[in-house]
Amino acid sequence: MRQKVFSIATIGIQIFTLILLTIILMGCTNEDIDQNVTINTSPVNHAPTVNLTAENLSGNIPFYPQFHYWCWDQDGNLDYCEMLSDGKVFVNSSTIPFPEDTVWPMYNTTGKHVIEIRGTDKEGLTSSTKLTYTVTSKPPGVLLNLSKTSSPAPFDPLNGIYLYCYDPENQMIFCEIKIDGDVIASYPNLKNNPSGGVDFYTLPDTVTHTIYKEAGGHTIGVIARDKEGQNASKSVEFVVTTAERSYPTRNLAVADQKLIWPVNCEPGINCSMGYPDLDKNGVSACGYTYQTHEGTDIGFTWEQMDVGVDVYAAYDGVVKWVFDGKYDRCTSFGDNIVITNPDCAPPTGEMTSGSSSGYQVCTESGPYCNADQRINKGWSECIWCFWGGNVVIILHPDNLYVFATRYDHLKKNSIIVSPGDTVKRGQKIAQVGSAGRSSGPHLHFEVWTDWYTPVDPWTPGCNPPWTYWQYSP
């Protein structure tokens, strides 16, 4: 009986405890919970987002930095966006992209320059990003072109060369010109031809010209450097072909009445041409001429003249007149006339027997009248004057078609024949010069059919077969 009472009492205590806990728990309210836990339901603010990219981070002054940018706020709270150049605000705008009339930065000084994009929202949060540019001065430049990159010997690559080295900011400290690795001229011993405020340096007048007489390949180059160590360079290769070409058409063994080419050159390759204008209309079917021109001009360069271009008798004959001793570097005719010596000046006074004045030389008086003078005018004695300075006239008594040939503008003291000498076709008589009324080195060659009666040795239309020439030069 006691055991049961104890068990009932124990169960009762447990039940009472459960009921008490329930009452305590049920007594807790939401108000009691709020006093101990806080829940934040307000929105979170984000800082602005900025972006700045560029493809090229270097350049020469004046330098305009090119870049792509963006400035925005994901909360829609952007207040303004700034662009800074080297730490200074360049643009401040609430409009993105920046307004169309924005003046972008430009750098006129060398060194490092920084572009920064900075965005700020209305709560004062800021974001930024930067790019650093390297700005240098303009590099030096070089110009190099040859008049020819291939030529038979003798050849001077400096003849007609177009060569300059320059620096846009006149900060050049080095310029060197080489041929085959050998320095031929260098800064500051160069000739300055300034243009547009920039110094352009080229070869000095005193530079040594190398005449290439042997076949082979060569290289000419120029390099320039400025104070910042920036370089510019260029090189050109040129080829000298076989020296002293022997043209197959110069056949001295052929026994005919034709004239051979009086110089050892190939027109269009290593000599130029000018043709007669005996009808005085200023036109030749063969090529270049000028009004009243009485002969065939075979032109050369000054360098070729200095090396020596031999002149040959075009046919067998007897030397009639020789005039020598005149200055032989005249430029007294053409577009750029410069009288550098009295021998290059026009004659003064009348033409008289045996006289010499300026670039004019005259023969003695004698039975040298042509058919028109003898028959129509009744003259028995005549004199002839020539404007070639140094001149040779050869008579050809054994030629049915050619009475005489004339050779003008010869190099001073190069004539190796004398009046009365018998010469053979192809025999050297002198060298090419620029004596007399001349625009530059050339041989003025005339064909006469009577005393001073020039004839055009080129067939009408300038087509073969050639009337007077042994071959087509």
Image (spheres, helix red, strand yellow):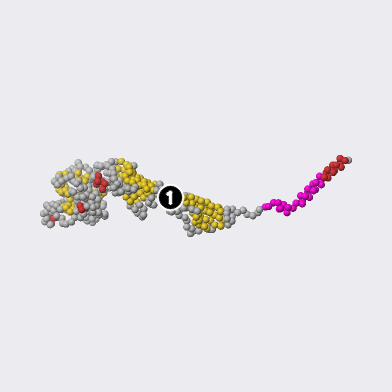
Q: Residues within 10 Å of mark 1 (few under 14, many from 20)?
A: many
Instruction: Give the magenta part as a residue range.
Output: 14-39
Whether residue 162 is visible? no
In percent of width and height, residue 10 lies at 83, 43
Residue at the (19%, 44%) spot, across then down: 428
* Residue type, numbered disc 1: Thr
In percent of width and height, residue 297 lies at 23, 50
Q: Main secondary structure of the magenta part?
A: helix
In percent of width and height, residue 355 lies at 15, 53
Considering the numbered disc 1 on the image, is that residue within a helix, a strand or a loop?
Answer: strand
Tag 1 residue: 136
Report the side of 116 relative to 46 (left or right): left
Whether residue 23 is visible? yes
Report the side of 202 relative to 258 (left or right): right
Report the side of 217 relative to 369 (left or right): right
Is residue 32 found inside the magenta-colored segment of the image?
yes
Residue at the (50%, 55%) spot, across then down: 88
